[in-house]
Image (cartoon, grey):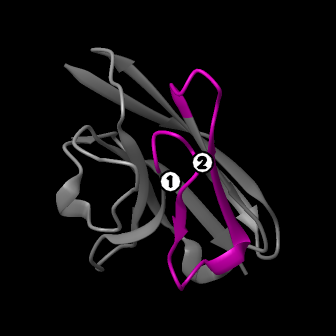
C-alpha cells in the first residue's frame, strides 16, 4: 500500500556529514508524519528524529540533538535527514517510517508508525 525507500547511506569519517533521503510512494497519504529510527548491531532500535505533515513540528533525540536536521520537501513526498559532526556511535542501520494517523504533531514512539522502509547503512569510522 505504502512504500518507503531510504537512500544516501554510506561510509564517512568521524566529524563528517551525510544526508539521507526517504521517498514515499504508493497510496497517497495526507496528514502523515515521518520518523527516522536507527538500530546498531546488538542493540534495540531507537528514535532519531521526526517531522509532522506540515513540517512545523520537528523532534530530535537527545543523542543527536542539534547535529541532525530533519526536513521534507514542498510536495511532502520526500523526507531528509542531514547529519553533521558524525560520531562512531552514530553507526547503525537507519530506517524511515510513516505514521498515517498523526495529527498536527509527530510521535517519538516507534509504535505509532505503520509503514517502514528497508533501511540504509550508515558507518562512521573513527
In magenta stretch: residue 71? yes
Q: Please, which residue is most extreme toward the front here? A: 104
Q: Kindly indicate whether the residue at mark 1 contacts the one at mark 2 (C-beta within 8 angstroms).
A: yes
Left or right: 14 as drawn, with respect to 38: right
Where is residue 13? Give x, y as percent: 78, 69
Residue picked out by circle 2: 9
User: Around disc 1, counting alpha carbons within 10 Å, would you say few (fewer than 14), some (14 to 19), or many (20 or more)?
Assistant: some
Q: Which part of the image, by quadrant, shows the C terminus?
A: bottom right
The answer to whether residue 95 is seen in the rendering is: no
Left or right: 106 as drawn, with respect to 27: right
| Quadrant of the rendered image containing residue 8 | top right
Residue picked out by circle 1: 121
Determine the secondary structure under disc 1.
Answer: strand
Q: In the image, is residue 20 above or below residue 62?
A: above
Q: Which residues, given as a range, are shown in magenta?
A: 52-78
The answer to whether residue 109 is seen in the rendering is: yes
Give the residue at x 40% y 72%.
Answer: 40
Mark 2 or mark 1, earlier in chain: 2
Give the residue at x 41% y 46%.
Answer: 34
Total tally of numbered discs in the picture: 2
Where is residue 19? Give x, y as percent: 70, 48
Where is residue 26? Give x, y as percent: 31, 14
Q: Mark 2 to mark 1: distance in Å?
A: 5 Å
Give the residue at x 27% y 67%.
Answer: 109
Determine the secondary structure under disc 2.
Answer: loop
Left or right: 77 as drawn, with respect to 21: left
Q: In the image, is residue 99 above or below residue 24?
A: below
In magenta stretch: residue 94? no
Q: Which part of the image, by quadrant, shows the N terminus?
A: top left
Give the residue at x 39% y 44%.
Answer: 33
Where is residue 124? Give x, y as percent: 66, 70
Amino acid at each position: 500500500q505504502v512504500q518507503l525507500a531510504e537512500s544516501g547511506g554510506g561510509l564517512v569519517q568521524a566529524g563528517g556529514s551525510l544526508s539521507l533521503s526517504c521517498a514515499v510512494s504508493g497510496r497517497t497519504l495526507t496528514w502523515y508524519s515521518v520518523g527516522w529510527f536507527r538500530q546498531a548491531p546488538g542493540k534495540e532500535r531507537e528514535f532519531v528524529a521526526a517531522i509532522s505533515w506540515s513540517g512545523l513540528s520537528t523532534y530530535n533525540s537527545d543523542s543527536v540533538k542539534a547535529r541532525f536536521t530533519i526536513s521534507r520537501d514542498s510536495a511532502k513526498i520526500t523526507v531528509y535527514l542531514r547529519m553533521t559532526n558524525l560520531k562512531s556511535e552514530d553507526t547503525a542501520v537507519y530506517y524511515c517510517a510513516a505514521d498515517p494517523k498523526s495529527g498536527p504533531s509527530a510521535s517519538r514512539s516507534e509504535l505509532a508508525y505503520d509503514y517502514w522502509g528497508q533501511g540504509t547503512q550508515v558507518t562512521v569510522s573513527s
